[in-house]
Amino acid sequence: MATSSSIHVAVVGAGIVGAAAAHFLAAAGARVTLLDASGPAAGATGASDGAVSVASKRPGPMMDLARYARAFYVRCERDGLFRDLFHRRSTFLVARSEIEAELVAKHGADLAAAGERVVEIDRETLLERIPGLDASVSAALEIPDDGHALGYEITERLLRMSRIDIRRAAPVSEIVMRAGRVAGVAIRDELLAADAVLVAAGIGSAPLLGLGEILIPRKGQMIVTDRAGASGPAIDGHLMAASYLAAKRGIVRDNAHIGLVIDPLMTGQFLIGGSREDHRSDHTTDAVTIAAILREALALYPPLARRRVLRSFAGVRTASRDGLPIVGSHPHREGVVIATGFEGDGICLGPFMGACAARLLLGEKPDVDLSALAPQRFVGIEARP
């Protein structure tokens, strides 16, 4: 492979993962062309909450990777790259029934086993921290080392701080191979020559890589309220209901397509989500789902009744068949690296996974073991030359 000072990398996808990879590739001296099918952060990155959260991850590789990813945010904030964009903020895991309390306790034990700080909060202390919580809240855990960042702001900062060529409205139709190695990408009738290609295009990665049976579109509907105050978060941290943990851990329950998170934004507004609708790739919202989200939110935090809904919106997250992202070198296409399938974890994992992908593209070893995310775990990865 060419040296980092001469290599040309085509990055397909301008969400948070692609933007991070492009930034760190350029910082290493590579020439980078970032290809965006539409506009910046137009996919899942721009339709997500801001939780940089270990608390929300299921046990195993995702929880471990989230700890690395959150530490990467801290480092980037300290170094100035994410200054004023990443903020430390607790996550509160709350339960409103005995069954939910058992789930929260189990999840807390898993977090502690992974090395995470977990603080059990009695009801009186919780109400002091978050006045107005419903009387039905019976148990809560605080994960004090989590944080918050808005994906579209992080993406904009990464691109603004990078010396890269950005091409908008440039949908890639094919990865071009010659003699078993990547030669570039086709954009309509044009061939863009490249020494290496990163595919970080969310659900758009499927047709480029033969992942149609492996990647699953998962729509999420969300709500934004008006401001609860002049500025700053209206409450002391993210509220994450047991329903969200149940969804992440694959537990089937009533109203299973709703996993509730109440995210206090720096503007004083609330971002409330959300639904998990498999095999849905449209961006429409519907009154039934939005009403279900609001009912759950009001049942947990009644002061929301004083807020007005400014808008509702939907985004499409990309999940994989086994629930883990796909990150690594393509097993059959030399010079092609994949970084997709992050579903609702892309904001937390994105910058770190982008940095790891950049190292792979440069022929270097990432800072952590990514073998659990390797593409070759799926026998359906397309093997055509």
Image: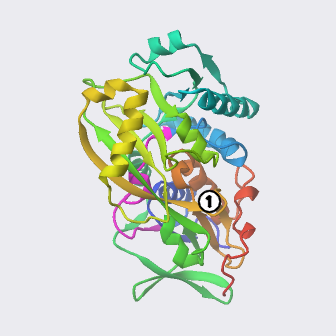
Closest to the observer: 46 or 322? 322
Determine the residue positioned at 60% across, 53% down. 353
Check the image and name the residue furthest to the front.
254
Is residue 145 shown above or below 29? above
Write the start and end of the magenta stretch as one range: 33-51
Is residue 192 shown above or below 244? below
Magenta stretch, main secondary structure, is loop
Closest to the observer: 233 or 365? 233
Determine the residue positioned at 29% across, 25% down. 231
Determine the residue positioned at 44% across, 56% down. 44
With 114 as the anchor, is 23 left or right in this view? left
Is 129 inside the magenta-drawn segment? no
With 94 as the anchor, is 190 left or right in this view? left
**Location of residue 359 (image quadrant):** bottom right
Give the total of numbered labels.
Answer: 1
Residue 333: where, in percent of width, then height?
67, 79
Residue of label 1: 357
| Secondary structure type for disc 1 | helix
Residue 384: where, in percent of width, then height?
66, 87
Determine the residue positioned at 76% across, 32% down. 113
